[in-house]
Image: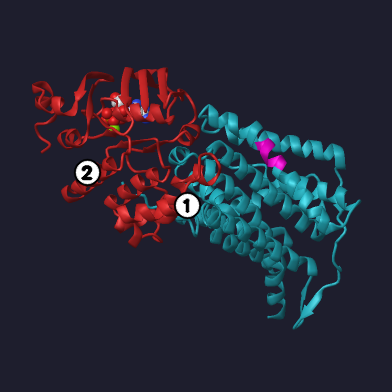
Chain colours: A cyan, B red
Amino acid sequence: MQIFAQLIVSGISLGMIYAVIAFGYQLTFATSRTLNFGQGEALMLGALVGLTLVGHMNYWLMIPLVLIFGALQGVVVERVAVRPALKNKSEFGWIMGTIALATIFKNVAENIWGRDDLKFPSPLPESPLTFHGIHVLPMEIVVVIGALGMMLAVEIFNRKSIYGKAVVATSNDRDAAGLMGINTRMVITFSYALSSMTAAFAGVLIAPLTLTGATMGVVLGLKAFSVAIIGGLNSGMGVIVGGLLLGIAETTTGFYLSTGYKDVPGLVLLLLVLAIKPAGLFGKTVINKV
Amino acid sequence: MLQVKNLHAAYGKVEVLHGISIEVPQGKVVTLIGSNGAGKTTTLRAVSGMIKPAGGEIRLNGKDITGLASHKIARTGLAHSPEGRRVFATLSVTDNLTLGAFPRLTFGRERGDVQGDLNRIFELFPRLQERRNQLAGTLSGGEQQMLAMGRALMLNPEVLLLDEPSMGLAPLLVEEVFRIIRELKTRGITMLLVEQFAAAALNVADYGYVMENGRISCHGPAEQLKNDPAVKAAYLGAAH
Ligand SMILES: Nc1ncnc2c1ncn2[C@@H]1O[C@H](COP(=O)(O)OP(=O)(O)O)[C@@H](O)[C@H]1O
Ligand SMILES: [Mg+2]
């Protein structure tokens, strides 16, 4: 029982990382019905830029700079890989565009930071805290708080500010949003900036807990994508639940079966959701009376 | 005032507007009538920038707005309540109305009294006030139409384009919609009204244009069109 509780606790912080990357997928899907298949690379770049910066400054001061870097990187993705496809009404151009750009980012990172995994210094003590015999790393708590805080901040922005409402309006009906005087092209660029910023943030959160390197984003990006599908591409609650399900499924299978099988439950879950409820566990279809 | 001169528009390679000229003078209500597929909606779309015109010229208060993106046209004071209402389903009634004033709230257009205007919209549409916290997607068709009109009015527009505000509504609601259009007219709001109920539209309008196959087939003062034998035969038979 104690071990099981420990596995769940460890699964939670992993799950929240999946959730926050999946949330990034949702942000661009909402406004433009496109996804950045380079989300994992946005995370990786955030972590590596963060790693370089912590050589010169405090971890917590580095975070805002990485957020700015992430946002700019997202703007580049939108301008280079997505906008041309949207302009030409090319239905699938953005898929190849974002994948190609992701590959380039990975190569660039390999050239700058090398192919080997690097150690990211932890800003907090690396000895676990113990509650009732369950160990938690301080950094794991930061991950959970940071991920939830990021999602909450975006949610509050969307609900309370006029610009956030403009983003929601664009997600609802882009043409009608244009009639309100909203520059929907800018909204889409903004959603890419926010999405990559979220991923870069996830990168610097998880980096101290794992190894950092040019390939770290590939698997994370893919798993977060399946979380977005499992939870539903339009449900904030869905990615949190989906992320936690996957995170906990991985830590428990890793322990009870074999670490060799730890990716299997998530994929089984993904296949089950696709077969039974393709809109995702929490996916909603919008009511729009004519 | 709104001036449209020799407007051409196409979907892909198929031209559907072959040179439309319309004038909507300050403070007047002008109606555009015509059968299904004549090109009325396309005309409004080309004017508000939802589609790019293929030719011609559009001026609002003398300023050339031809070919501008729709958000820029909205900022010059042209409001368009589109066909099918297009309310923001996952936002509340109040948020939908607030977004109508987006340019005023974000320095795209003179701010004025946004809160006061919101209250005036609620006075004009008491149903919306009752439902102000409800999501727009859960409103009835009639309420969504009121919301679409209210949202457009929140721009404080120089000219208001209304595309078939009575479409799909029960007779009692159609009457309500026309009552509101008449009320807006007495408040001096300049309107271009597209309607399938030609008789009702010509009753409220000062001037009318009849459209057929992407062309204006005739136009004149509303009184005169109402009594024109050809217009009567084609458009005023069934409706009312
Ligand atoms: N999105 C579209 N794509 C292609 N053709 C369209 C589109 N919308 C309208 N049309 C065509 O353009 C013509 C004019 O349509 P429309 O402007 O909607 O007419 P109305 O509003 O008078 O009923 C019709 O022949 C219609 O089939
Ligand atoms: Mg129409």
Residue A112 in magenta stretch: no
Q: Secondary structure at mark 2?
A: helix
Q: Nearer the viewer, mark 1 or mark 2?
A: 2
Secondary structure state at the residue bearing disc 1: loop
Q: Chain of mark 2?
A: B
- Above or below residue A61? Residue B38 is above
Answer few, some or many: residues within 10 Å of disc 2's Cα (few below 14, many 20 plus, some between 14 and 19): some
Three-letter amino acid code at disc 1? Pro
Callout 1 crowding tier (Cα within 10 Å): few <14, some 14–19, many ≥20: some
Residue at 29%, 54% in the rendered image: B140
> Residue B166's spot in the image, x, y percent?
24, 42
In this rendering, would A145 be left or right of B202?
right
- Measured as percent of width and height from the top left, residue A79 is found at 64, 33
Quadrant that contains the C terminus of chain B: top left
Q: Residue at x 66, y 58 (%)?
A: A150
Identify residue for label 1. A278
At x 47%, y 52%, the residue is A278
Total labels: the figure holds 2
Depicted B39 relative to depicted A263: above or below: above
Left or right: A111 in relation to B1? right
**Residue drawn at (23%, 35%) of the image:** B195
Identified by mark 2, the residue type is: Phe
* Ligand 1 image position (quadrant): top left
Residue of label 2 = B178
Can residue B28 be spotted in the picture? yes
Q: Which residues are magenta?
A: A72-77
x, y percent for residue A104: 74, 34
